[in-house]
């Protein structure tokens, strides 16, 4: 993840949504054991929550 950030990754709605759906495909070589969320409604709910807390 650090390399992705150094490479210019910006966590926006699109990139975070893709990561939450399939982290291993979105960011190969990550050691996270998070398998991802299968339901689009769950991804949308997380993104909406994060947007509601942003300043």
Image (cartoon, rainbow, N blue to C red):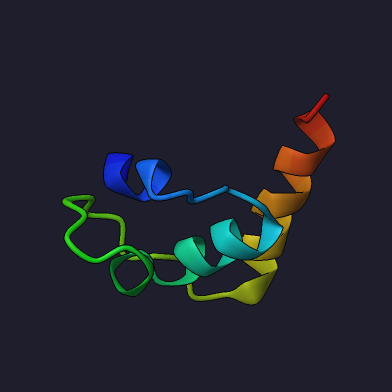
Q: Is residue 3 above or below residue 36?
A: above
Q: Quadrant of the C terminus?
A: top right
> Toward the viewer: 42 or 23?
23
9 relative to 51 in the view: left or right: left
Q: Quadrant of the N terminus?
A: top left
Q: Quadrant of residue 29?
A: bottom left
Where residue 18 appears, as percent x and y from the top left, is 53, 69
54 relative to 18 in the view: left or right: right
Where residue 12 appears, as percent x and y from the top left, is 66, 52
Q: How many marks?
A: 0
Direction top: furthest residue: 55
> Toward the viewer: 35 or 8?
8
Where residue 38 appears, as percent x and y from the top left, is 49, 75
Q: Is residue 30 above or below residue 2?
A: below
> Toward the viewer: 10 or 35?
10
Where residue 26 appears, as percent x and y from the top left, is 38, 69
Which residue: 57% across, 75% down? 39
Q: Quadrant of residue 50?
A: top right
52 relative to 32 in the view: left or right: right
Which residue: 32% across, 63% down? 27
Direction front: furthest residue: 7
Q: Quadrant of residue 15?
A: bottom right
């Amino acid at each position: 993840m650090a390399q992705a950030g150094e490479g210019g990754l910006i966590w926006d709605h699109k990139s975070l949504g893709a990561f939450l759906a399939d982290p291993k495909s979105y960011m190969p070589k990550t050691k996270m054991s998070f398998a991802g969320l299968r339901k689009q409604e769950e991804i949308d709910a997380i993104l909406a929550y994060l947007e509601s807390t942003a300043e």
